């Protein structure tokens, strides 16, 4: 099982929350899903997005301006919408390659906005058809952070916990590999060290290393379809999902997409021996404190 992870809002640029999101895809389903998404690109955009230097990331396809453009005219017939969208994208590509600026028509802007929404909806439908599960930690931007830089944040630890539970539910021998969007090399080293300490030096982490390979892979998102998919999910959760205690406003236009992503979330059960009963375990959750338990307990005693 492959867990592709990306984030939304960590640059603190207007996003209401920080979101660390993941999509879990079985290796037997991954290539079929990638091919289906590429076919959807042709269906809605008339071109593969990589060919025109565009990633299908949330902040590119689902920003407010794109929705405003989509609403500025009536729904465009799908074939004409595809042709107008292709012209829109090709003009942008030629400009970025050093060509002269080309005027884009109102219809082209409208078509691109409508195509982007339809494509995002289709991608989430394809996820459902290829047995994808979603996971996410939705984090208050004011959440306390670990004082010690080598400690793994709770959003990562809780995601790994949910991954572990999901793998346990699948089969007695299912293993998981973690794939991140590429970070700056210094950040990647820090994260690898934090994960190594978590998986090898903590009791729970060591237990979970029996199912999750502790050393992650880092890939270029513009070359890796599933990481871009994780980004779309993270963006939808950030702007369209509100769990208990989450008070920031939502973008109503994102809510239908967020609901579809939310419906794909992992839900399991675990027996609590102390309580003597089963408790639900959710793959999408909210955190307002990122410090590990030891640090929180020390701080509370002061």
Image (cartoon, rainbow, N blue to C red):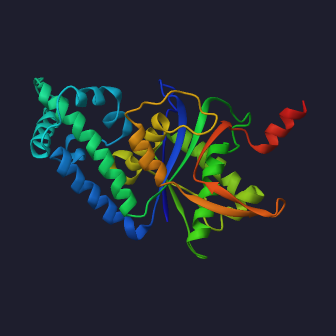
State which quarter of the image contains the C terminus. Answer: top right
Q: Position of residue 131 (x, y in %)?
A: 42, 64
239 horizontally vs 56: left or right = right
Q: Position of residue 72 (x, y in %)?
A: 21, 25
Q: Residue at x 55, y 39 (%)?
A: 187
Res 24 visible: yes
Where residue 71 sits: x, y (%)?
24, 28
86 relative position to 160: left or right:
left
Residue sitting at the far bottom: 172
**Which image quarter: residue 143?**
top right
The residue lying toward the viewer, choosing from 209 and 257, is: 257
Q: Is residue 16 left or right of residue 96?
A: right
Identity of the residue furthest to the right in this view: 301
Residue 226 against residue 237 in the figure, above or below: below
At x 22%, y 56%, the residue is 39
Locate residue 12, reporting x and y percent: 52, 26
Residue 224, can we see it?
no
Q: Is residue 3 above or below residue 88?
A: below
> In percent of the image, x 39 and y 49: which residue is there?
229
> How many callouts does the rendering have?
0
């Amino acid at each position: 099982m492959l867990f592709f992870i990306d984030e939304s809002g960590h640059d603190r640029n207007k996003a209401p929350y920080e979101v660390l999101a993941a999509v879990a895809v079985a290796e037997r389903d991954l290539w079929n899903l990638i091919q289906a998404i590429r076919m959807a690109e042709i269906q809605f955009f008339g071109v593969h997005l990589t060919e025109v230097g565009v990633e299908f990331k949330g902040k590119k396809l689902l920003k407010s301006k794109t929705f405003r453009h989509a609403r500025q005219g009536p729904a465009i017939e799908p074939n004409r919408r595809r042709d107008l969208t292709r012209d829109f994208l090709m003009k942008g590509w030629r400009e970025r390659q050093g060509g002269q600026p080309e005027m884009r028509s109102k219809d082209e802007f409208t078509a691109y906005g409508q195509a982007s929404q339809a494509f995002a909806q289709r991608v989430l439908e394809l996820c459902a058809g290829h047995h994808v599960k979603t996971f996410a930690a939705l984090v208050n931007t004011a959440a306390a952070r670990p004082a010690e830089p080598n400690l793994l944040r709770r959003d990562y630890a809780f995601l790994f916990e949910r991954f572990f539970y999901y793998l346990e539910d699948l089969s007695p021998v299912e293993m998981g590999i973690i794939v991140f969007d590429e970070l700056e090399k210094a950040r990647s080293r820090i994260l690898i060290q934090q994960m190594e300490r978590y998986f090898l030096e903590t009791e729970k982490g060591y237990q979970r290393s029996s199912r999750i390979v502790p050393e992650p892979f880092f890939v270029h998102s513009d070359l890796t379809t599933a990481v871009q998919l994780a980004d779309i999910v993270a963006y939808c959760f950030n702007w369209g999902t509100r769990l208990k205690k989450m008070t920031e406003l939502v973008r109503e236009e994102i809510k239908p997409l967020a609901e579809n992503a939310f419906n794909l979330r992992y839900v399991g059960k675990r027996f609590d021996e102390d309580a003597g009963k089963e408790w639900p375990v959710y793959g999408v959750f909210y955190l307002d404190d990122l410090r590990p338990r030891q640090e929180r307990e020390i701080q509370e005693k002061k």
